[in-house]
Image (cartoon, helix red, strand yellow):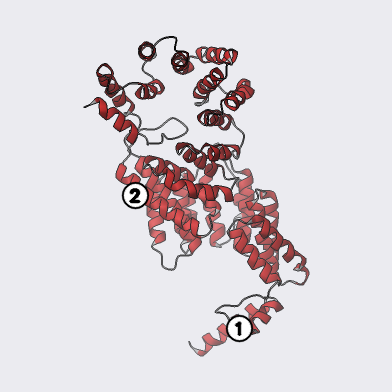
């Protein structure tokens, strides 16, 4: 190093020390017992460091205790420490779901120490409050606050422009960043617009950057996993239901699904290393879906449980846990996850299904009855929930409820298929006619209603492939089902008997 460079470095060191507190100077002057400077026990710096560590592991109660202890010491603090305190307090508010208070705290952090990351956090909290889930809209007040050349600010501006539906503008802004944040901003914009191939390219370029910061690496791994998952679905027809079938939509590329699984696991590993960050919510849905397709539900259930306990407010995570737990027959966990979801028709209808599967028949029909008048009859789960609630009511001798809900299914043309299935299941329960006659009646209704997919799935479970009369029909119906969904291992084995 040349002498003028040494002089400049010494000046920077001096100014850096001056800007910090006396506690920092004391720590710097203490005996070198460790490889790094440790703040003195119970000093302001120590409390802030502990709070940061606890926030990283989402231990919010203990983090609040450390922040409260730090707050008492603020009157004698340096500007850098005050900024750090308010930034950590803002992160605590964000983690507890208080974006208004988080925004105020981040603003106070910036007032104490005008760092770009503080301002970006302040504006991002405001953006979370006003962002719409109903498609692109303008956010002029947010955009107006995002000025300057700090990468955190530019990256957020790119994301807001993407949320406004302006992909080319978002990419143009992202390209102003000189550093790996550029690839993260580009990948986010392409992901918002479902440009999976472009997002994957951005992620690969970013991940190839030397000395990549770990936080950016985690985001790029997450976005790469989502891009690979969506590319695996690209060859499949559009699935109109809210949730993918567990075995996957027909036509998915199995090799790409396995590639997506590897990418998802890499992203999950990175999130697990830091004690599960809130970004787990951005990958939980595809983690759950891919595990279901590959038969790995039992493998992922313990980790989903661990993450969901830490983040009870993350809706995608709780929904994924509920789905995987139900597939594993762990209905206690599934019901707990369901309870943590925000109130909605879908949540209440899912609860009816889970209670029935858990053999909690009184709770099942009681829950359905208490919400019956308010349920949207067009919800895709209503027909199935009405069917299982009726069966639960029948088991506990509630004929009036069975009659009421059966009539409701008959009253709507789009629910006729569920009315037909309910009659079939009740015929079996009542033993009024033998199973073969009940099945013949169901087959007649199946043809009369245009061979709906819901009844086709039910028939696959009812037809006996070892029965000579039913074997050919079982194979025929299976072929029509497999035009829409990939066969599960159980379905393939069941139908295979009919081909012998």
Left or right: where 462 falls relative to 137: left
**Badge 2: few (under 14), some or many (20 or more) residues near its Cα, within 10 Å?**
some
Q: Relative to 54, is 453 above or below? A: above
Give me the C-alpha separation between circle 1 and circle 2: 51 Å
Left or right: where 3 falls relative to 262: right
Residue where numbered disc 1 is placed: 11
Residue 375's tag is none
* Residue 177 visible, this orientation: no
| SS at mark 2 in the image | helix
Residue at the spot 49% in from the left edge and 40% down from the top edge: 325
Q: Where's residue 1, x and y in %?
A: 48, 87
| SS at mark 1 in the image | helix
Residue nearest the viewer, comparing 375 with 357: 357
Q: Quadrant of residue 496?
A: top left
Q: Relative to 366, is 433 above or below? A: above
Tell me which numbered mark, 1 or 2, is placed earlier along the sequence: 1
Given contact means CB atoms under 8 Å apart, are the residues at marks 1 and 2 in contact? no
For the C terminus, give its image quadrant.
top left
* Residue 45 visible, this orientation: yes
Q: Where's residue 146, x and y in %?
A: 59, 55
> Which callout, 1 or 2, points to the residue nearer the camera?
2
Residue 259's tag is 2
Residue found farthest to the bottom: 3
Q: Where's residue 101, x and y in %?
A: 70, 52
Residue nearest the viewer, comparing 430 with 91: 430
Q: Where's residue 354, x and y in %?
A: 53, 31
Residue nearest the viewer, comparing 252 with 427: 427
Residue at the spot 41% in from the left edge and 45% down from the top edge: 195
Left or right: where 341 falls relative to 216: right
Q: Quadrant of residue 221?
A: bottom left
Q: Relative to 447, is 475 above or below? A: below
């Amino acid at each position: 190093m040349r002498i003028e460079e040494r002089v400049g470095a010494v000046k920077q060191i001096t100014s850096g020390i001056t800007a910090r507190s006396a506690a920092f100077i004391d720590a710097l002057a203490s005996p070198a017992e460790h490889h790094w400077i440790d703040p003195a026990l119970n000093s302001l710096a120590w409390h802030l460091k502990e709070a940061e560590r606890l926030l990283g592991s989402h231990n919010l109660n203990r983090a609040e205790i450390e922040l409260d202890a730090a707050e008492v010491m603020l009157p004698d603090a340096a500007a850098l420490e005050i900024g750090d305190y308010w930034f950590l307090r803002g992160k605590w508010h964000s983690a507890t779901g208080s974006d208004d208070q988080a925004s105020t705290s981040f603003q106070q952090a910036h007032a104490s120490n005008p760092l770009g990351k503080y301002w970006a956090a302040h504006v991002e909290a405001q953006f979370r409050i006003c962002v719409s889930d109903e498609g692109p809209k303008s956010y002029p007040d947010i955009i107006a606050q995002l000025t300057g050349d700090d990468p955190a600010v530019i990256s957020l501006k790119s994301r807001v422009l993407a949320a406004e539906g302006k992909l080319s503008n978002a990419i143009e802004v992202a390209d102003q960043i000189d550093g790996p944040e550029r690839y993260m901003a580009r990948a986010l914009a392409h992901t918002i617009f479902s440009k999976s191939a472009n997002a994957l390219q951005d992620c690969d370029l970013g991940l190839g950057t030397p000395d990549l910061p770990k936080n950016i690496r985690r985001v790029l791994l997450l976005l790469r996993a989502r891009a690979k998952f969506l590319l695996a679905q690209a060859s499949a027809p559009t699935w109109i239901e809210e949730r993918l079938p567990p075995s996957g939509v027909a036509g998915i590329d199995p090799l790409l699904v396995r590639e997506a699984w590897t990418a998802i696991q890499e992203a999950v590993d990175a999130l697990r290393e830091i004690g599960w960050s809130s970004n787990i919510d951005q990958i939980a849905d595809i983690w759950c879906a891919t595990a279901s397709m590959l038969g790995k539900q039992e493998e992922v259930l313990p980790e989903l449980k661990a993450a969901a306990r830490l983040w009870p407010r993350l809706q995608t995570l709780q929904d994924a846990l509920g789905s995987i737990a139900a597939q594993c027959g762990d209905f206690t966990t599934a019901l707990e996850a369901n309870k943590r979801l925000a109130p909605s028709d879908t949540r209440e209808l899912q609860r009816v299904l889970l209670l029935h599967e858990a053999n909690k028949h009184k709770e099942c029909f009681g829950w359905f009855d208490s919400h019956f008048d308010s349920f949207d009859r067009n919800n895709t789960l209503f027909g199935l929930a009405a069917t299982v609630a009726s069966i639960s009511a029948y088991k506990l001798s509630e004929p009036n409820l069975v009659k009421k809900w059966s009539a409701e299914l008959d009253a709507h043309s789009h629910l006729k298929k569920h009315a037909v299935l309910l009659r079939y299941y009740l015929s079996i329960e009542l033993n009024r006619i033998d199973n073969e006659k009940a099945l013949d009646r169901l087959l007649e209704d199946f043809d009369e209603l245009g061979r709906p997919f819901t009844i086709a799935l039910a028939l696959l479970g009812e037809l006996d492939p070892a029965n000579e009369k039913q074997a050919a029909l079982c194979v025929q119906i299976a072929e029509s089902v497999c035009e829409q969904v990939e066969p599960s291992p159980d379905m393939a084995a069941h139908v295979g008997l009919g081909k012998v």
